[in-house]
């Protein structure tokens, strides 16, 4: 075992409309890993991950971010990778490459992101804790609940939290959610690439722990139809200017800009988000853009604390739980700090899940 490190190489596959995580283990001969540059490039069979055709199927994995592996223990590592083509250019599924550029372009604004990742625990195709042939009590008792009649899956949730902290991830909290079996963890605030990479790694740790509990986490934005809350990925965002004295004015100006690019943002805010953004269950509708102080029915909420302090951040409540943070952060940076976001500029128009235009009602 001496000087052998298990490095789990993790990447996003080519599944449409929502990428999944894939990973495999590389044994590295080294005493310790000190930077991502110590980790060698690797490859995989893209024809098995919807990232290549069979006749020319090799894709490259480039390590870009790593953390101590909390499950195998140190010196082993979890490694987030970008997928590259044979010639070294970013693969079409490599959305991180776009965020890399946007983060560099707007670095002088010192942007920070904080994501609230909601998810639903499942066992055998049914939400954890739900009666096998029926439904639990209506919502109301579960949010931030305690007790085995109110929350389900805490053992897994706690194991996940501990391991995220052990790995040095910037988790800012967890809570049980409104729908039974639904939970949330928060990552950030962090600069764009760190926040996004950490979210993907925290998701991987959650799935991996789920194996041991025979429970899996779904990021479906509306796992159960009817009077059950959906699952979001609220994205909290600020720039240096918003965090300084008088920043509230910049926050409001940014909200106005976000309103002008609502449709473009919705293209990359997660598949099936139209089923979640109905105007009910603490959401705005997908058709309209609205912002307001403390308003949990708005598209973008200005937190009470930001309004009172006159500076702070905004909360974009529109992203679904299955968001790709690389895409969502790119959109937010381009609209807030640049000329506005257009998915077509990135070849992301193929990911248009829903056209947010209200159906015409004919009299
Ligand atoms: P909510 O009241 O919407 O449930 P949470 O406490 O769950 O709020 O999440 C708040 C999120 O805001 C956290 O992810 C945190 O990291 C993030 N956050 C806090 N301050 C900032 C900031 N200045 N810029 C960006 N994100 C921030
Ligand atoms: Mn929250
Ligand atoms: Mn929540
Ligand atoms: Mn929130």
Image: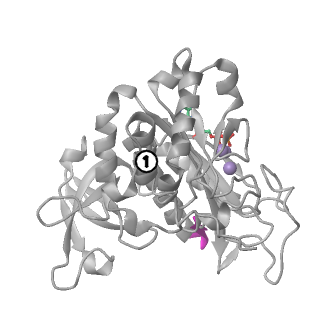
Question: Magenta residues, as a range?
Answer: 212-219
Instruction: Compare residues 142 and 357 and report the one nearer the observer.
Output: 357
- Residue at 48% across, 60% down: 267
Residue at the top extreme, as displayed: 245
Q: Is residue 126 magenta?
A: no
The quarter of the image holding the C terminus is bottom right
Instruction: Compare residues 159 and 262 and report the one nearer the observer.
Output: 262
- Residue at 85% across, 71% down: 136
Relative to 112, say whether 297 is above or below: below
Residue at the left extreme, as displayed: 87
Instruction: Compare residues 325 and 77 and report the one nearer the observer.
Output: 325
Q: Quadrant of residue 296?
A: top right
SS class, disc 1: helix
Seen in the image, is 353 located left or right of residue 299? left
Does any atom of ligand 1 lie closer than 8 Å to the CB of label 1? no
- Residue at 65% across, 67% down: 275
Instruction: Compare residues 202 and 28 and report the one nearer the observer.
Output: 202
Residue at the front extreme, as displayed: 363
Q: Is residue 213 magenta?
A: yes
Q: Which residue is mark 1?
A: 331
Residue 86: horizontal and vertical position, in percent? Answer: 13, 67
Residue 96: horizontal and vertical position, in percent? Answer: 33, 53
Number of marks in picture: 1
Seen in the image, is 316 located left or right of residue 112? right
- Residue at 69% across, 52% down: 284
Residue 48: horizontal and vertical position, in percent? Answer: 31, 80
Q: Is residue 70 visible?
A: no
Q: Which quadrant of the picture is home to ligand 2?
A: top right
Residue 52: horizontal and vertical position, in percent? Answer: 24, 77
The quarter of the image holding the N terminus is bottom left
């Amino acid at each position: 075992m001496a000087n052998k490190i298990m490095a789990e190489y993790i990447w996003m596959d080519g599944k449409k409309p929502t990428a999944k995580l894939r990973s495999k283990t590389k044994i590295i001969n080294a005493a310790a890993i000190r930077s991502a540059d110590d980790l060698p490039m690797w490859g995989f069979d893209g024809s098995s991950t919807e990232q290549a055709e069979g006749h020319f199927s090799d894709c490259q994995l480039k390590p870009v971010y790593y953390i101590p592996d909390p499950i195998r223990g140190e010196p082993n590592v979890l490694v987030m990778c970008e997928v590259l083509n044979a010639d070294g250019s970013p693969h079409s599924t490599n959305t991180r490459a776009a965020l890399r550029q946007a983060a560099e372009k707007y670095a002088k604004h010192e942007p920070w992101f904080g994501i609230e990742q909601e998810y639903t625990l499942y066992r055998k195709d049914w939400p954890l804790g739900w009666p096998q042939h029926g439904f639990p009590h209506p919502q109301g008792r579960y949010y931030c609940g305690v007790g085995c009649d109110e929350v389900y899956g805490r053992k897994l949730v706690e194991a996940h939290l501990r391991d995220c902290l052990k790995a040095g991830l910037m988790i800012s909290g967890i809570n049980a959610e409104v729908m039974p079996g639904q939970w949330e963890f928060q990552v950030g605030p962090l600069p764009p690439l760190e926040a996004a990479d950490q979210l993907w790694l925290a998701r991987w740790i959650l799935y991996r722990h789920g194996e041991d509990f025979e429970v899996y986490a779904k990021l479906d934005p509306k796992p159960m139809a009817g009077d059950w809350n959906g699952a979001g990925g609220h994205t909290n965002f600020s720039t240096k200017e918003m965090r300084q004295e008088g920043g509230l004015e910049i926050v409001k100006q940014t909200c106005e800009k976000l309103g002008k690019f609502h449709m473009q943002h919705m293209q990359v805010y997660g598949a099936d988000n139209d089923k979640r953004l109905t105007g009910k269950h603490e959401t705005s509708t997908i058709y309209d853009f609205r912002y307001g102080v403390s308003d949990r029915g708005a598209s973008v909420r200005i937190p009470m604390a930001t309004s009172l302090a006159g500076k702070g951040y905004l909360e974009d409540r529109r992203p679904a739980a299955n968001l790709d943070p690389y895409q969502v952060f790119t959109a937010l940076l381009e609209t807030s700090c640049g000329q506005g976001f257009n998915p077509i500029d990135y070849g992301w128009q193929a990911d248009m899940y829903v056209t947010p235009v209200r159906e015409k009602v004919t009299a």
